[in-house]
Image: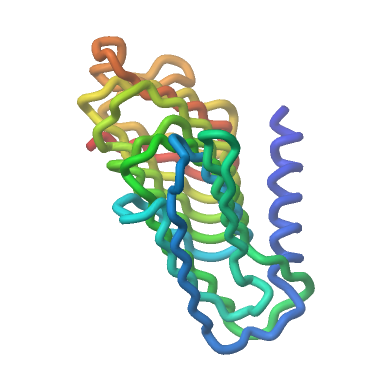
Amino acid sequence: MQFVKIQKIMLVALLVGGLVGCKVAGELQEDTRTIELGKAESVELRLNMAAGVLRLQGGAGELMESYFKYNIDRWKPEVGYSLSGSRGILKVKQGKSSGMTVGKKRNIWEIRLSNDVPMDIKVNLGAGQSKLDLRGLMLESLNVDMGVGELTVDLSGEQNQNLDVVIDGGIGSATLYLPRHIGVRVSVDGGLGSVNARGMNKKGNVYTNETYGKTDISIEIDIDAGIGSIDLELK
C-alpha cells in the first residue's frame, strides 16, 4: 500500500512538471468572476488547480466572488456553474498548459464563497501553497487531494452539523486548525513523515480532542498521509 502511495505521489509530481512547462511567462493578467446562487438550495464546489497559490474563504455577497492573477495565457481559469434540480454545481479549473516554462511563473487565486448556502467542497491540488479558511461556511463535507506543497485548512469556526473531511496527502506540509469546543477525531493512515498534535489524545493512529464524544456535533477527519509533516492545532 505504501509503495502504491509513493508511486502516486511521484506521478503527481511528474504530471505537474509537465503542466508547468514549455511556455514563456508573460505579463501578469488579472481576471474577476462573480457567480450568483440562483435557485440552488445547496452547492457542490469542484476546484482543480494544477500549480500556484490558492486562498479560499467565506464572506462573499454572492455564491462566489473571485480574483485571479496569472502570467501564462493558457492558465486562465475556467469557471462554470449549472443547476441540477435544487443542487448547484460550481466548477473552477485551471486552464491546461504543457512543455517547459521559461521565466517566473505566477498563478494566484483568491476565492470567496457565500456563508449562506450548504456546501460540499472538493479541492484537487497540484503544486503550490493553499490556504482554505472555511470558518463561517455552511460546510457539509470537504475532500482535498493535496498534491505537492503547503496546505492550511482552518476548521476552527462554528459548526451546525456533523462534518466529514477526507484529505489525501501528498509531498509537503499540512496544517489543520481545529476547534476545542466541538468534538474532533482525526485518523491518519500511513505516510512517511511526522504528526504533531499537541493537546490531543493519541491512540494508535487516531487523535481526538478533549470534547470528542461529549458534544452533539462532531468533526471526523480521515487523512491518507503522504511524505511530509501534519500539524493538528487546536484553537
Residue in view at x 67 percent, y 66 percent: 95
Looking at the figure, which quarter contains the C terminus?
top left
| Residue, far bottom | 27
**The one of 15 and 137 positioned closer to us in this rendering:** 137
Is residue 138 shown to the viewer in this render? yes
Q: Whole-percent x and y of residue 54?
A: 47, 60
Q: Which residue is found at the position 41% from the left and 15% from the top? A: 203
Name the residue: 53% across, 50% down. 172
Nearer to me, 154 or 62: 62
Against 149, residue 86 (above or below) is: above
Task: Tell me where residue 111 sits by quadrant.
Answer: bottom left
Quadrant location of the N terminus?
top right
- The image quarter containing residue 225 is top right
User: Left of 132 or right of it: where is 10?
Assistant: right
Vertical side of 7 occupied by 129: above or below: below
Count up the numbered dots: 0
The residue lying toward the viewer, choosing from 86 and 212, is: 86
Residue 147 place in picture, x, y as percent: 60, 50
Q: Is residue 131 visible?
A: no
Query: Compared to 173, does 197 lie above or below?
Result: above
Residue 18 picture location, percent across and down: 76, 65
Q: Residue furthest top?
A: 213
Report the colour scheme.
rainbow
Q: In this view, does 174 lie to the left or right of 197?
A: right
Name the residue located 33 percent from the left edge and 50 percent from the top edge: 58
Q: Where is residue 2 in the image (x, y as percent from the top left)?
A: 69, 31
